[in-house]
Structures are given as C-alpha cells and as structure tokens.
Image: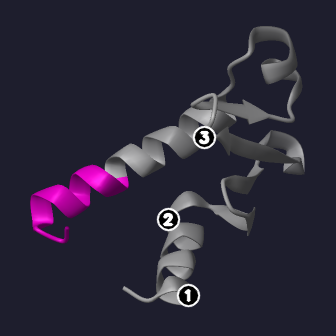
Amino acid sequence: MRNQALIDLLIEKFDGEIIEDNKWRVDGSKDNHYWVEWHPFHKHYSCGCKGYAFRKSCRHITHVSEQFKNNLRNRLTSGGI
C-alpha cells in the first residue's frame, strides 16, 4: 500500500486527522477537537482533554487505540498482512 493510500485509510478509519507522525486530531463531544499522541519511547498515549489531565486516560485515547487494534485484527483475519 502506498503511503498516501495508507494515510487516507487511517484518516477514514479513525475519524481523525493525522497532523504529524504519531499524532491525531480526534473529534470529541460538544464539537471539541483533541490531540491524541503516541509516545514511542515511553510507549503510551497522551491527550489534550481534561479527562486525561485528571485521570491520565480518556475515551479519545481508547477510541484511537481500539481502532488500531480492530484494523490490525481485520487485516490479520482477511490475510491483508
């Protein structure tokens, strides 16, 4: 799969917008947008929402993480990898 095709697929599947590597804009409730970022060195996500600031977890991170897992699972079961 070409890079642009992969980027387009990720944007379509994750309801977000990839701004830079390992960083996504995710739509929240009440028309807010949040930034979810993967930190490869520390192996964790962070988000710019209040939930993450208080609990160090949020539904935006769960959404992005679950979408990645589901996409990988679908690709494995369909023989796409």
Q: Is residue 63 magenta?
A: no
Sooner in the amino-acid sequence: mark 3 or mark 1: 1
56 shown above or below 3: above
Q: Amino acid at mark 3?
A: Pro
- The residue pinned by badge 2 equals 13
Q: Amino acid at mark 2?
A: Lys
Q: Is residue 45 left or right of residue 19?
A: left
Residue 44 in percent (x, y) is at: 61, 29
- The residue pinned by badge 1 equals 4
At 56% from the left edge and 77% from the top edge, which residue is drawn? Answer: 7
- The front one of 65 and 12 is 65
The crowding category of the residue bearing disc 3, from other C-alpha atoms within 10 Å (few below 14, some 14 to 19, many at least 20), is few
Quadrant where the image shows the C terminus: bottom left
Residue 2 in percent (x, y) is at: 44, 89
The crowding category of the residue bearing disc 2, from other C-alpha atoms within 10 Å (few below 14, some 14 to 19, many at least 20), is some
Residue 73 in percent (x, y) is at: 24, 50
Q: Secondary structure at mark 1?
A: helix
Distance, label 3 to label 1, CA atoms, is 22 Å
Sooner in the amino-acid sequence: mark 2 or mark 1: 1
Q: Please report the bounds of the magenta region as a residue range.
A: 71-81
Disc 2 to disc 3: CB gap under 8 Å: no
- State which quadrant residue 1 falls in: bottom left
- State which quadrant residue 28 falls in: top right
Q: Secondary structure at mark 2?
A: helix
Outermost front residue? 41
Residue 62 in percent (x, y) is at: 56, 32
Distance, label 2 to label 3, CA atoms, is 21 Å
At 74% from the left edge and 32% from the top edge, which residue is drawn? Answer: 46
- The residue pinned by badge 3 equals 40
